[in-house]
Image (spheres, grey):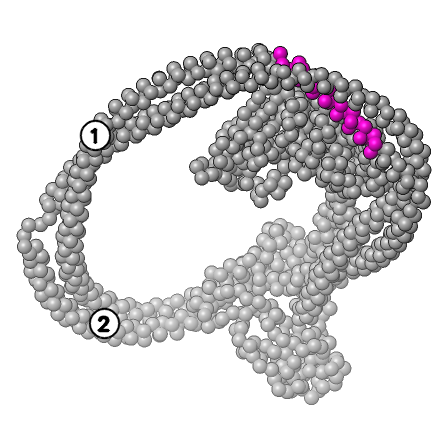
Amino acid sequence: MRLKSISLSGFKSFVDPTKVTLPSNMCAVVGPNGCGKSNIIDAVRWVMGESSAKTLRGESMTDVIFNGTTHRQPVGQAAIELLFDNSTGKVGGEYAAYNEISVRRLVTREGTSDYFLNGNKCRRRDITDLFLGTGLGPRSYAIIEQGMISRLIESKPEDLRVYIEEAAGISKYKERRRETENRMQRTLDNLDRLTDLREELERNLSHLKRQAQAAERYAEYKAEERELKAQLLALQRRVQAGVASRAQREIDDFATERERYQAQVSSSVSEIESLRQQITDANAGASQLQGDFYSLGSEVSRIEQAMNFAKQRRETLARDLEQTLEGKQRELGLVDSDSQRLTELAEALASIEPTLTREREEVVRVDQALAKAEKVAATAEGDWDHFTQRAAVPKQQVEVQQGRQGNAERNLAALNERLVRIKGELAGLSESVDETDLDTVSSKLADAEQAVATQKTALDSLKETLQSSRSELEALRQKQDELRREIQALTGQRASLEALQSDARARSSGDFVSQWLGNHGIEQTAPLVEAIVVDEGFEAAADVVLGDWLVALQAELASLSPSAVVPPAGLTLVDAEPGERSADPLLLSHYVQLPRGLEHLMSGVRVADNWQAALDARASLSADESIISKDGLWVAKHWMRSRGETDEEEGIIARQAQLNAVSEAFEVASRALEETDGRIEELRAKRTETERTIDAGQEALQGAQQTLSRLDTQRRALIAEREHRQNREAQLRRDLTDAEARAVEEQTVIDEAKQMLNRAQHQVESDEGARETLETARTQAREQVRQCRQEKQQADVALNRSEVRHRELLTQREALSRSIERAREQVTSYEQREASIRGEMPTEENPDLAAQKELSELLERRLAVESQLTQARQGLSELESALRSKEQSRMEAEQAVAGVQTRSEGARLKLAETGVRVEQIDAALSELEVTLEAVEESLPEDADETEWQVRVERIGARIHRLGPINLAAIDETSRAEERKEYLDAQDDDLRTALETLQNAIKKIDKETRSRFKDTFDTVNAGFADLFPKVFGGGTACLEMTGDDLLDTGVAIMARPPGKKNSTIHLLSGGEKAMTAIALVFSIFQLNPAPFCMLDEVDAPLDDANVGRYARLVSEMSKKVQFVFITHNKITMEAAEQLMGVTMHEPGVSRLVTVDIEEAARLAAS
């Protein structure tokens, strides 16, 4: 896989579409500073997914779009496309079958960034995944920008590890591991939530099962109660049928008497109808007059509006005519001025024609002179080349001997310097080893050990805090469960109480009653039991005394319509206005507050503390007095009543109080649950924060442990350095003997070179005379060619200027001709508009005279109609007064009819009540979902209403003893069991998935450790081998900063020849650059990326090191494609293709390509 070409458009300074073709493996990009060379490197990084604008030397991603210059407008988008040759199939997956792969990125000024693979739109991640493991990427070791070579060597161990990982091809494993960890964390979170749900569900399920059993018994009792109630209703319907027959006979007797009074009412009605007809006629006449009055007013308004519109129209036409005349004059002026300018242009064209002819002839003459001068110059160049070839032999000999002598002298000087250096180093090594550094590192090592211990102590404290939070959270969860169970029990209790209250109020809240109230415009309100106020302890007494009145409905009786006077049977309505309590503490009305008008219900009812006191006071009671005990025994002089245990209506007040208490307890428990939930959330947040703090502490501990490991490594390095000095001294003494022998040999070479150099210099001096003559002739010929070319350039410029001027004059003449034609057409348009406006303008002097006359006549007619309308309204008032008198007479006759009607209504009321009660009984049977016929068949012949009432009360007592019932418990239990099965299955699935993910991470970690170790060893060996080649000696190696191969950092240890530096930071800029080059190329030897881009890597190097660098790049180009930016001539000479970037137009980069091999062939030919 190799990079074939780079296409740029609108990217930074490459505004025009530019294609950078890379046919060879050694391509150099050259050009002056600021011409845009580095933009090519930025383009490659950008298209590979770089998302940091700062890294691309910008503030935002849209800064990569060409922003315009003084002569060019900004463009709207930037696009880069890389074309790869994949004929070897290195890119696997779905793109392995493609011989070429295109990667393209496009960004607009709106900030949208799109990626394309082989023309198909894709995600940034698809681009990243494509290059994973290949060594390519926006920040990989394959792209080395300016300054990055030194930053690479000075990077942190964790950052340097990234390059080893990329070389090992484990970046894709890290990405998979990160995704797997994220999925595993989500699985753990889901598992925790699922465990909480399962535990809570198991606690609730046992409670629901008990409630479901109670609900089943409740359903059985309710079914039996429903059957008994249906039979009781059938017995009550038989009684109501006899009452209805007697009421009908009374209604027939009252009907005859009412007809007699009705005849008197009919006589009064006929007279009233006559008066109403007269009033209707009078109203019709008045309405006609009033319509005429309004019609005349509308006509007056219309004429006034028409006069105003005519005036405005005249003013508008006058303004349009004035504007039209001005426009016409303006266009006529333009025609005159453009005609004059056209004449001037014709004269200018006539004057420039002779100049054009003369300049064209001058260009032909200069071309001929230039051809002649170039022919003479070619002859002189041939003579000069023949001489230089003959004279080059002794000159080359001089250079060879000078180089031989210089090399020997330099070698001798280097040997002398080496002797001095060896002796100096021996003197330094002979001194005792400085133990200060070793002591300092040991002291720092002890401090680091103390820091690790401190971090561990702090971490243990945080873990204890976390455990405390978890314990408190568990306690709150238990409290939360208790509150939820309490709320659930209260919910069931409240539902049961509400059901009992609803059954007790069934007669006043059934569908039939609601329909009757709605038909008569009465808004249904709360029953009386919810409106009265009973002091504590007197509920049973109030239940007994009030009885059926407790289920009465509150209503505004004054708003009842006449048709609503007969309520349904069993329905009681009371006014909603609150009453007052009695001041006598001996009376029950002192402890019970009823609505106004119901005080008689407790009139003369006294209270006693218990039933014994009530019985003792019985003898002292008068006939209209009674006494009731707090426990519900009601005693009068001639009767006695006790509160039944199963009487639902008698216990309605107590149940209402119990319902209120249960509701209040429910609200208290709900608030407590809400507070507990809030505290749990608070503790969870605190736990999360503590866990984050622990994570940070663990990171700090890890950092301290890394520092400890680094210091321990330094201490071991210092000990090794001491041993190295001892070995080095022995080596230096052997080198000293060898250097002294080589110095004698180099001195012999210097003496021989001096003799041969003298002979060659004599020959060069004899050739200097001929050289001067030939060089003078060649110089004169070149000067003549230069002058001719300069004259040709001046002639071309003059001719071009005249031709441009000629074309400009022709263009101006055509434009003026079109402008004159358009102006004349506009004048014609204005003349037509003028004629149209003059035709619309009126010719008479006073066009509003007729309208004013018509307006005066209409005003006079409106005054006359207004007078007639006043007289008609007076006559209408007299007729209405007579009608009111007759209405009074009719009302008196109707009152007599109403007296009879009232007595008749009494009988009808009784009949209606009976009918309503029958309807209520039928409705109650319908609510019980039974028919009267079916109930009659199942009812025994000797059935008695009183006996059946006792049976209903008995079954109701059984239901009451069941207590609060959660009717939804059966369905809830079934749903809970289904949910438990579902959650158990989910728990098994999650645990299986978690185990799979853990195994996947173990497999990834194992593969990562193996690949990283193998790659580290291979790169380290290559680094140790390349470093001496680059520096001509010295040692270098890579070291791991930790024991765990998954996260250990990588440090560089490098010592150039003769240096004893302890860290890489002590090296010079050039040494750092050469070290980084050795490291990068050692990575390339292991895992060569498809291409490598180097941006002025050779900048800090001297010529000798640049030569080594160029040779190393040339050697590696057999396997790797190199694209390098350079200013160094030595590096340029090593390139196979040169690409020059120029900025002839300020702010715009252009590309010039030169093939070195082809250029050499052309030069040789």
Whether residue 737 is situated above or below residue 241 in the rendered picture: above
In the image, taking residue 921 as reference, residue 1071 lies left or right, namely right
Asked whether residue 403 is drawn in magenta, I would say yes
Furthest residue toward left:
844
Going by the image, does 166 lie left or right of 793?
right
- Where does the image place residue 421, in percent across and percent down from the top left? 85, 36
**Mark 1 nearby-residue class (10 Å; few <14, some 14–19, many ≥20):** few
Task: Single out the mark in the foreground, 1 or 2.
Answer: 1
Q: Which amino acid type is shown beneath numbered disc 2?
A: Glu
Callout 2 secondary element: helix
Q: Position of residue 666 (x, y in %)?
A: 70, 64
- State which quarter of the image contains the N terminus: top right
Q: Is residue 8 left or right of residue 353?
A: right
Is residue 7 at all visible to an observer of this figure?
Answer: no
The alpha-carbon separation of the residues under discs 1 and 2 comes to 104 Å
Q: Residue at x 76, y 36 (%)?
A: 1071
Q: Amino acid at mark 1?
A: Glu
Magenta span includes 1118: no
Q: Which residue is mark 1?
A: 347
**Which stretch appears magenta?**
390-417
* Residue in the image at 71% along x and 33% along y: 1101
Q: Where in the figure is residue 689, as x and y percent of width and height?
A: 75, 55
Q: Main secondary structure of the magenta part?
A: helix
Can you see residue 435?
Answer: yes
Q: Which residue is mark 2?
A: 880
